[in-house]
Amino acid sequence: MSFDKYLKAKKALIITLDDAIYPEKDYLLQVYYLFSEFMAYTEQFDAKLMLDFMKAEFELHGNKDIFLKTAAKFGIANKYEHNFDLLHETARLPLKLLMYQNVLSLLQEVVVERNKIILLADGNPAVAINKIKQLEWHGLGEYLEVYFTAEYQFSIDKTLAAIFASKNIEPQEVTLILSENQFDQKLVNLDIDCFSVTEIL
């Protein structure tokens, strides 16, 4: 497919991480797997039953309160919530995280055009760093600059303003690609070419 619409007369492509570069589900389900295996080892829970429950909860309701729901279902002690949270920051995944194929092609074209690739990481920076380290970048990692919205009050708009100031670029010189959810929530109020990643998937 042609990416001219996103790259023509631009100096930078800014893209968010979760569900824009790769499906966040691929990370979370591996974390759930590791946690269920940990609980099986330490407390002799049935790892498969626990993982199946967490997967089903995630499919229905997302990641929110998933530890509390799992703890209530299986009688897991509250002290293990720390282990669950820590796994999100430190887990060594069994499988590498893979980019959406068309996003990979877009980023490769950005590099060929000698434009900047700027990655916006939302949420907990330690979790974001762990994800970034375990993504298969296909050699693109060296061309990336990462900004954490946590450093700008978790605001995409404030993070973008900081990028424009530090890089000396104008909003009209940038294309921004968000996850479908971020795009639908209209998280960006700046006058900037902004697209949902679903356009290119």
Image (spheres, grey):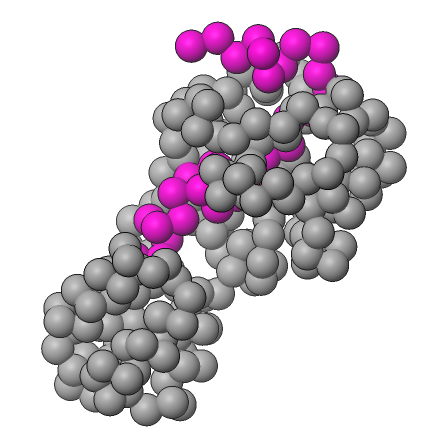
Q: Quadrant of the N terminus?
A: top left
Can residue 91 be seen by looking at this rendering?
yes
Relative image position of residue 154 (x, y in whole percent): 68, 56
Q: Residue at x 48, y 38 (%)?
A: 180
Question: Could you say where residue 135 lies in the image, as x and y percent from the top left?
Answer: 43, 43
- Seen from the viewer's position, the closer of residues 186 and 11 is 186
Q: Specify the quadrant that holds the C terminus.
A: top left
Residue 134 position (above or below residue 84): above
Check if residue 22 falls in the magenta segment.
yes
Q: Is residue 22 left or right of residue 109?
A: left
The structure residue drawn at horizontal position 22% and vertical position 81%, both measured from the top left corner, is: 73
* In this picture, residue 186 sits left or right of residue 27: right
In the image, 48: left or right of 196? left
Magenta residue span = 1-29
Relative to 61, residue 122 above or below: above
Any magenta on residue 199? no
Q: Where, by quadrant of the figure, is residue 198 drawn? A: top left
Residue 171 picture quarter: top right
Is 73 rendered above or below residue 120? below
The relative height of residue 31 versus residue 178 in the rendered view (above or below) is below
